[in-house]
Amino acid sequence: MGTVTLMLFGFLILLVFLNVPIAIALATSSILVVLIQGSVPLTLFIQTSFSSMDSFPLIAIPFFILAGDIMSRGGMARRLVDFIQSFVGSLTGSLGIITIIASFIFAAISGSGAATVASIGAILIPYMLRNGYAPGYAASISASAGALGPIVPPSIVFILYAVMANTSISDLFIAGIVPGVLVAIALLIVNYIICKKEGFGKPQAVVEEVEKVPFLKALNEAKWALLAPVLILGGIYGGIVTPTEAAVLAVVYSLVICIFSYKEIGVNDFIGIFLKSAHTSGSILIFVSAASFFGLVLSIEQIPQFLASSIASWTTNPFVILLLINIFLLIVGMFMETVAAVLIFVPLLLPIVIPLGIDPIHFGMVVCLNLSLGLITPPLGINLFIGSNIANVPFERTFKYVAPIFGALLIVLLIITYVPSITLFLPNLLGG
């Protein structure tokens, strides 16, 4: 078993090092091990790949992605920004506050961190630059607020974790509410401290482009955008629709509002929107396919059981094991895309924590929050790259501001890790 493990992960690391896409590297390393071992028929690769995608819960992913793209293109993001700006006004760091709150709401629609940065950041980063915010900070706070995407329900990462862990998507969505709020509060506190210290967003610096829109006018314009997360999440939590049905509802709702109410999407826009959504959805489902076969090879070779027994022989202290897993996932998040990390490591880590009595819903929150921090940590840091491109600032200029933000989110991660009631309170209350 030791030789097989070394071969499997050796091939995977080598292929990733050679710049092979991770999904292809997962499939190729698994196939190579199967061919060398000869104990598993290669036809199992095709069977596992197709059966893994033949999943009703997974249908929610392309629909949530499509809904997010429609809402982004159709003007919902801009109206959310105008509404939040109408009551935030010119407080210290006001544009940072608007970015965080707007990202929180938009994450509750799109479920994607990158989509949140691209939508909200594209609107607010130019405003911040014109109002005296440092380009590095504008990129950093937008990227960090976008990290709410994998935490605030309905999260695409939650769906993938639930499928891999065979647990309830709805319970994960409910469990994500309080951690998502805590992350947003931490970002608001850090935003105030940094802006106060650096002098960003002083009232006298505000320029004409961001003049406050009257509250009632902004509310009227944003009412349909604000209603979207209420319908989506209310339908799920109320037991009216499944998460997959809610995703379809989100698409239909966004199309109706953006075509007939906002009138910012026409027939000519459909091709671009659907192509973008299909590209994103396809890349995720290829990950699912390849990772499922990779996980099957791991299971056949009893690698998860081997790792679990090895760690158990060293320590059975849940505090220590969770700390080690946190450190491991933080490192993984720095180098690996969130979707790939969930699909690869959840089957490995669950057999370690379940015997310790750790609730899979709570553990899912720990995993997802850990990996969401990878969206703002170099060298991968996809959110930072998006924010830096919008702000037209070198990637390394963000590090000064990302460091304190990361520190605050790390404190939230530790609180959520070691106080499971924060995560489990709402699922237990509503489930009871």
Image (spheres, rainbow, N blue to C red):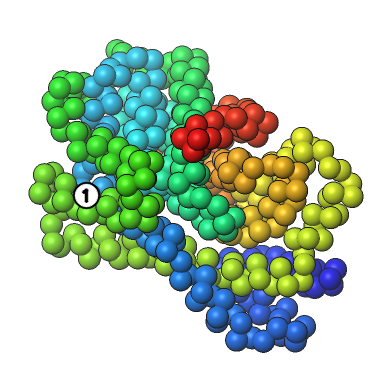
The residue beneath circle 1 is 253
Q: Is residue 12 left or right of residue 212?
A: right
**Residue 180 in sight:** no
Whether residue 127 is visible, yes or no, is yes
User: At numbered mark 1, what does the secondary structure look like: helix, strand or loop?
Assistant: helix
Task: Indicate the quadrant where residue 102 lies.
Answer: top left
340 sits left or right of 328 in the view = left
Q: Say above or below: 242 vs 20.
A: above
Q: Give the x, y percent position of residue 289.
A: 53, 70
Residue 108 in the figure: left or right of residue 406: left
- Residue at x 44%, y 59% (from the top left corner): 57
Closer to the camera, 197 or 77?
Answer: 77
Q: Position of residue 402 (x, y in %)?
A: 55, 33
In this view, 147 is above or below 412: below
- Residue 299, x across and y down, in percent: 71, 68
- Circle 1 crowding by C-alpha within 10 Å: few under 14, some 14–19, many from 20: many
Q: Amino acid at mark 1?
A: Tyr
Please name the residue shown 57% across and 57% down the image.
Answer: 166
Q: Is residue 175 above or below residue 248?
A: above
Percent of width and height locating residue 312: 85, 49
